Image (cartoon, rainbow, N blue to C red):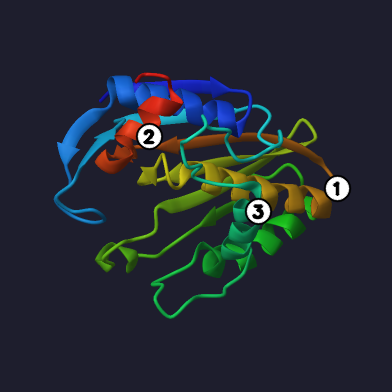
Amino acid sequence: MNLVNISANSIEDAWFQCLNKVLTSGYEYTIARGSFEGHKRLELDHVTVQITNPGQRPLSPLVPEGVPSPATDDYIADYLTYLMTGERAETEQYTYGEDLEPQMYSVIDMYKNCPETNQGCMTIGSRHSIGMTDPPCLRVLDTRLRYGKLHFIIYFRSWDLWAAFPTNLGGLQLMKEFMVSEIGCEDGEIIATSKGLHLYDHTWSLARQVCRLE
């Protein structure tokens, strides 16, 4: 297993660095199960991304002219509903908000009453998730209140670098800012880890254009 560590200032910076790393060092294979079965993807064995200033605006990445952006700040703001409420469309097997909404308010209350705690960890899914066609990608949203700041420590079992990374982190940052306002602390870092950060083959050319590799 090749372990990759990336330090970035912003979500945009983290995205660009990850794109470069996946394109130049990713493991190529054909998908045998799950989304886009039969297609190829490039994937890092394991990556940890530390973002020191995730609240830097814009949250969405700027891309070269002619390349469709995978996210906009308006889209990220709309995505926040998916993270913070239990609303679910008929076609959805789950939403993150179903699990996160009640836990989020518990964590807020926990830090108000006891800032020095290790128990502010939120989970997504259950023992039944393993039987889903597409189980949740985000599985753990852990938190840390230290040095007067709220930090997020996140685990994705699988993570689409092109279509999901900017929106996921942008939405989680907005959620963190809401929690910060409720707790009465300062905004901190995001540390995200995954053993499945990947690019699908239909996005390789777009990613190379963003990274000026073609």
Q: Amino acid at mark 3?
A: Asp
Location of the N terminus (image quadrant): top left
Residue 159: x and y, percent?
39, 44
Q: Residue at x 33, y 65 (%)?
A: 129
Residue 80 lies, with reference to residue 199, above or below; the image says below
The residue carrying mark 3 is: 74
Number of residues whose C-alpha sits closer than 10 Å to that of mark 1, classed few (under 14), some (14–19) or many (20 or more): some
Task: Say what secondary structure mark 1 lies in.
Answer: loop
Q: Nearer the viewer, residue 18 or 213?
A: 213
Residue 199 versus residue 105: which sits nearer the camera? 199
Q: CA–CA distance between discs 2 and 1?
A: 41 Å
Which of labels 2 and 3 is toward the front? 2
Q: Residue furthest bottom?
A: 90
Can residue 114 be seen in the rendering of this structure?
no
Residue 135: tell me if it is visible.
yes
Amino acid on which disc 2 is placed: Leu
In the structure shown, which secondary structural element does the residue marked by tag 2 occupy? helix
Of marks 2 and 3, which one's residue comes earlier in the chain? 3
Q: What's the residue at 51%, 62% (across, down)?
A: 96
Where is mark 1, residue-wise?
184
Q: Amino acid at mark 1?
A: Gly
Residue designated by label 2: 206
Residue 44: percent from the left, percent from the top? 31, 30
Q: CA distance from mark 3 to mark 1?
A: 26 Å
Q: Residues within 10 Å of mark 2 (few under 14, many from 20)?
A: many
Question: Is 205 on the left or on the right of 9, as rendered?
Answer: left
Of the numbered discs 2 and 1, the one sitting upstream in the chain is 1
**Placement of the C terminus among the 4 image quadrants:** top left
The spot of residue 18 in percent (x, y) is 43, 27
Residue 64 position within the rendered picture, expressed as x and y whole percent measured from the top left? 51, 29
Kindly identify the residue that appears in the image at 18 percent across and 46 percent down. Answer: 39
Out of 184 and 57, give the one closest to the viewer.
57
